[in-house]
Image: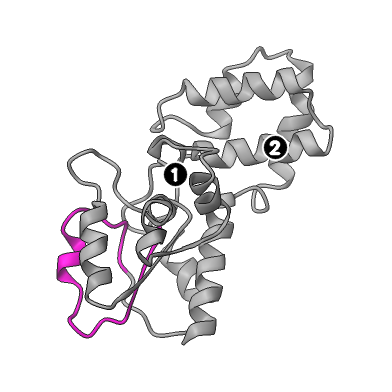
Amino acid sequence: MSHNQVCQFLKVKADLRGPIKRGDLQNIPDDAKIVAIVDGVFHMNLSVTPREVLSVLKRGVKVIGSSSMGALRAAELDVYGMVGIGDVYRMYKDKIIESDAEVALTFDPDSLRAVTEPLVNIRYSVLRALEKQIIQPEIAEKIIQTAKDTYFYDLTYYYLFNCFEENDRELEPFKQFVMENRKELDLKQKDALKLIEYLNTIY
Protein backbone atom coordinates (compact mmCIF):
# COMPACT_ATOMS: atom_id res chain seq x y z
CA MET A 1 0.00 0.00 0.00
CA SER A 2 1.52 3.33 -1.04
CA HIS A 3 2.15 6.23 1.33
CA ASN A 4 -0.33 8.33 -0.65
CA GLN A 5 -3.05 5.75 -0.13
CA VAL A 6 -2.36 5.57 3.60
CA CYS A 7 -2.49 9.36 3.91
CA GLN A 8 -5.78 9.38 2.03
CA PHE A 9 -7.55 7.15 4.56
CA LEU A 10 -5.69 7.54 7.86
CA LYS A 11 -7.31 10.31 9.92
CA VAL A 12 -4.85 10.33 12.80
CA LYS A 13 -1.29 11.59 13.10
CA ALA A 14 1.25 8.84 12.52
CA ASP A 15 4.90 8.29 11.69
CA LEU A 16 4.66 6.42 8.38
CA ARG A 17 7.58 4.16 7.52
CA GLY A 18 8.45 1.64 4.84
CA PRO A 19 8.19 -2.15 5.18
CA ILE A 20 9.47 -3.21 8.59
CA LYS A 21 12.80 -4.99 8.86
CA ARG A 22 14.95 -6.40 11.62
CA GLY A 23 16.07 -3.73 14.07
CA ASP A 24 13.36 -1.18 13.26
CA LEU A 25 11.41 -1.78 16.45
CA GLN A 26 14.47 -0.90 18.52
CA ASN A 27 14.26 2.62 17.10
CA ILE A 28 10.66 3.51 17.87
CA PRO A 29 10.22 6.50 20.23
CA ASP A 30 10.08 5.76 23.95
CA ASP A 31 6.65 7.40 24.18
CA ALA A 32 5.13 5.34 21.35
CA LYS A 33 1.76 3.88 22.33
CA ILE A 34 0.80 1.99 19.16
CA VAL A 35 2.79 0.25 16.42
CA ALA A 36 0.91 -0.96 13.35
CA ILE A 37 2.69 -3.42 11.07
CA VAL A 38 1.57 -4.13 7.52
CA ASP A 39 4.37 -4.90 5.07
CA GLY A 40 7.81 -6.18 5.91
CA VAL A 41 11.08 -7.39 4.46
CA PHE A 42 11.04 -11.18 4.14
CA HIS A 43 14.66 -12.12 3.50
CA MET A 44 15.82 -14.57 6.16
CA ASN A 45 18.36 -12.28 7.80
CA LEU A 46 16.26 -9.13 7.53
CA SER A 47 12.77 -10.08 8.75
CA VAL A 48 11.53 -8.60 12.01
CA THR A 49 11.58 -11.41 14.54
CA PRO A 50 8.83 -12.50 16.96
CA ARG A 51 11.25 -11.74 19.81
CA GLU A 52 11.53 -8.11 18.66
CA VAL A 53 7.76 -7.76 18.64
CA LEU A 54 7.51 -9.36 22.07
CA SER A 55 10.01 -6.89 23.50
CA VAL A 56 7.81 -4.01 22.34
CA LEU A 57 4.68 -5.65 23.73
CA LYS A 58 6.43 -6.02 27.10
CA ARG A 59 6.97 -2.25 27.12
CA GLY A 60 3.19 -1.82 27.06
CA VAL A 61 3.03 -0.78 23.42
CA LYS A 62 -0.06 -1.95 21.54
CA VAL A 63 1.12 -3.80 18.42
CA ILE A 64 -1.33 -4.40 15.58
CA GLY A 65 -0.69 -6.49 12.47
CA SER A 66 -2.47 -6.95 9.19
CA SER A 67 -2.18 -7.84 5.53
CA SER A 68 1.38 -9.15 5.20
CA MET A 69 4.26 -9.41 7.68
CA GLY A 70 1.91 -7.86 10.22
CA ALA A 71 -0.64 -10.63 9.70
CA LEU A 72 2.01 -13.35 9.92
CA ARG A 73 3.50 -12.07 13.17
CA ALA A 74 0.04 -11.44 14.66
CA ALA A 75 -0.96 -15.05 13.99
CA GLU A 76 2.15 -16.14 15.90
CA LEU A 77 1.90 -13.63 18.74
CA ASP A 78 -1.78 -12.87 19.34
CA VAL A 79 -1.63 -15.12 22.41
CA TYR A 80 0.90 -12.62 23.83
CA GLY A 81 -1.26 -9.59 23.11
CA MET A 82 -0.54 -8.64 19.50
CA VAL A 83 -3.74 -7.73 17.66
CA GLY A 84 -4.41 -9.30 14.26
CA ILE A 85 -6.80 -7.77 11.77
CA GLY A 86 -8.17 -9.00 8.46
CA ASP A 87 -8.57 -12.11 6.36
CA VAL A 88 -4.86 -12.73 5.74
CA TYR A 89 -4.25 -12.81 9.50
CA ARG A 90 -7.15 -15.24 9.89
CA MET A 91 -5.82 -17.45 7.08
CA TYR A 92 -2.45 -17.70 8.84
CA LYS A 93 -4.12 -18.28 12.20
CA ASP A 94 -6.30 -21.07 10.81
CA LYS A 95 -3.33 -22.64 8.97
CA ILE A 96 -5.01 -22.16 5.59
CA ILE A 97 -1.71 -20.61 4.55
CA GLU A 98 1.62 -20.96 6.37
CA SER A 99 4.52 -19.76 4.23
CA ASP A 100 5.68 -16.16 4.18
CA ALA A 101 5.87 -16.59 0.38
CA GLU A 102 2.08 -16.17 0.34
CA VAL A 103 2.37 -12.44 0.98
CA ALA A 104 5.77 -11.65 -0.53
CA LEU A 105 5.91 -9.05 -3.30
CA THR A 106 8.16 -6.40 -4.77
CA PHE A 107 7.39 -2.71 -4.46
CA ASP A 108 8.52 0.65 -5.75
CA PRO A 109 11.01 1.97 -3.16
CA ASP A 110 9.83 5.57 -3.53
CA SER A 111 6.04 5.27 -3.56
CA LEU A 112 5.87 1.82 -1.87
CA ARG A 113 3.33 0.84 -4.53
CA ALA A 114 3.21 -2.91 -5.16
CA VAL A 115 4.86 -3.97 -8.42
CA THR A 116 4.09 -7.70 -8.28
CA GLU A 117 1.08 -9.69 -7.08
CA PRO A 118 1.27 -11.69 -3.85
CA LEU A 119 0.18 -15.31 -4.00
CA VAL A 120 -2.48 -14.75 -1.35
CA ASN A 121 -4.24 -12.25 -3.65
CA ILE A 122 -4.28 -14.79 -6.46
CA ARG A 123 -5.71 -17.41 -4.10
CA TYR A 124 -8.43 -14.94 -3.15
CA SER A 125 -9.22 -14.15 -6.79
CA VAL A 126 -9.49 -17.83 -7.62
CA LEU A 127 -11.76 -18.44 -4.62
CA ARG A 128 -14.08 -15.61 -5.63
CA ALA A 129 -14.15 -16.91 -9.21
CA LEU A 130 -15.02 -20.40 -7.99
CA GLU A 131 -17.83 -19.04 -5.83
CA LYS A 132 -19.27 -17.22 -8.83
CA GLN A 133 -18.83 -20.36 -10.98
CA ILE A 134 -16.61 -18.45 -13.39
CA ILE A 135 -14.03 -21.26 -13.46
CA GLN A 136 -14.05 -24.97 -12.77
CA PRO A 137 -12.06 -26.53 -9.88
CA GLU A 138 -9.47 -28.09 -12.20
CA ILE A 139 -8.71 -24.69 -13.76
CA ALA A 140 -8.54 -23.12 -10.30
CA GLU A 141 -6.02 -25.73 -9.20
CA LYS A 142 -3.95 -25.14 -12.32
CA ILE A 143 -3.88 -21.37 -11.72
CA ILE A 144 -2.84 -21.74 -8.07
CA GLN A 145 -0.14 -24.28 -8.86
CA THR A 146 1.30 -22.09 -11.61
CA ALA A 147 1.35 -19.11 -9.23
CA LYS A 148 3.04 -21.19 -6.50
CA ASP A 149 5.69 -22.31 -8.98
CA THR A 150 6.47 -18.70 -9.93
CA TYR A 151 9.14 -16.75 -8.03
CA PHE A 152 7.52 -13.79 -6.28
CA TYR A 153 9.78 -11.32 -8.11
CA ASP A 154 8.03 -12.35 -11.34
CA LEU A 155 4.48 -12.96 -10.16
CA THR A 156 1.96 -10.66 -11.81
CA TYR A 157 -1.37 -11.47 -13.41
CA TYR A 158 0.15 -10.61 -16.78
CA TYR A 159 2.97 -13.11 -16.24
CA LEU A 160 0.56 -15.71 -14.88
CA PHE A 161 -1.79 -15.49 -17.85
CA ASN A 162 1.14 -15.75 -20.25
CA CYS A 163 2.05 -19.10 -18.68
CA PHE A 164 -1.06 -20.60 -20.23
CA GLU A 165 -1.76 -21.45 -23.83
CA GLU A 166 -2.87 -18.44 -25.85
CA ASN A 167 -5.98 -20.30 -26.97
CA ASP A 168 -6.89 -21.60 -23.51
CA ARG A 169 -10.52 -20.51 -23.61
CA GLU A 170 -11.29 -21.90 -20.17
CA LEU A 171 -9.08 -19.21 -18.67
CA GLU A 172 -10.67 -16.27 -20.51
CA PRO A 173 -13.58 -15.76 -18.06
CA PHE A 174 -11.11 -15.62 -15.17
CA LYS A 175 -8.93 -13.09 -17.00
CA GLN A 176 -11.93 -10.86 -17.59
CA PHE A 177 -13.10 -11.25 -13.99
CA VAL A 178 -9.69 -10.21 -12.64
CA MET A 179 -9.28 -7.26 -14.99
CA GLU A 180 -12.73 -5.91 -14.09
CA ASN A 181 -12.31 -6.35 -10.33
CA ARG A 182 -8.65 -5.68 -9.53
CA LYS A 183 -9.36 -3.37 -6.59
CA GLU A 184 -11.95 -5.69 -5.03
CA LEU A 185 -9.61 -8.67 -5.41
CA ASP A 186 -6.63 -7.03 -3.68
CA LEU A 187 -7.01 -8.85 -0.37
CA LYS A 188 -3.81 -7.43 1.13
CA GLN A 189 -4.91 -3.87 0.48
CA LYS A 190 -8.41 -4.55 1.80
CA ASP A 191 -6.87 -5.84 5.03
CA ALA A 192 -4.56 -2.83 5.28
CA LEU A 193 -7.61 -0.58 4.98
CA LYS A 194 -9.30 -2.53 7.79
CA LEU A 195 -6.27 -1.81 9.96
CA ILE A 196 -6.48 1.89 9.10
CA GLU A 197 -10.18 1.92 9.95
CA TYR A 198 -9.33 0.30 13.29
CA LEU A 199 -6.69 2.95 14.01
CA ASN A 200 -9.17 5.70 13.16
CA THR A 201 -11.63 4.31 15.73
CA ILE A 202 -9.25 3.81 18.67
CA TYR A 203 -7.67 7.27 18.60
The answer to whether 3 appears left or right of 132 in the picture is: left
Number of numbered discs: 2
**Quick one: label 1 or label 2, which is nearer the N terminus?**
1
Residue 107, given in percent of the width and then of the height, sits at 38, 48
Q: Nearer the viewer, residue 155 or 51?
A: 51
The x and y percentages for residue 110 are 32, 58
Which x, y percent locates residue 21? 23, 54
Q: Residue furthest right?
A: 133
Q: Examine the image and state in which quarter residue 140 appears.
A: top right
**What secondary structure is the stretch in magenta mostly built from?**
loop
Relative vertical location of residue 148 with respect to residue 107 in this rendering, above or below: above
Residue 163: image location, x then y, percent: 57, 17
Boundaries of the magenta span: 17-38
Crowdedness near tag 1: few (<14), some (14–19) or many (≥20) residues, C-alpha within 10 Å: some
Identify the residue at horizontal 58%, vertical 21% (top origin).
162
55 is within the stretch colored magenta: no
Q: Which mark is residue 23?
A: none
Q: Which residue is mark 1?
A: 115
Q: Residue at point 59% right, 26% down? A: 144
Q: Residue at x 28, y 70 (%)?
A: 57
Inspect this view and state whether residue 10 appears. Answer: no
Q: Is residue 84 above or below residue 183?
A: below
Eye-nearest disc, 1 or 2? 2
The residue type indicated by label 1 comes to Val
Q: Residues within 10 Å of mark 2 (few under 14, many from 20)?
A: some
In front of the other: 14 or 160: 14
Q: Amino acid at mark 2?
A: Leu
SS category of the residue bearing label 2: helix
Labelled disc at residue 127: 2
Q: CA distance from mark 1 to mark 2?
A: 22 Å
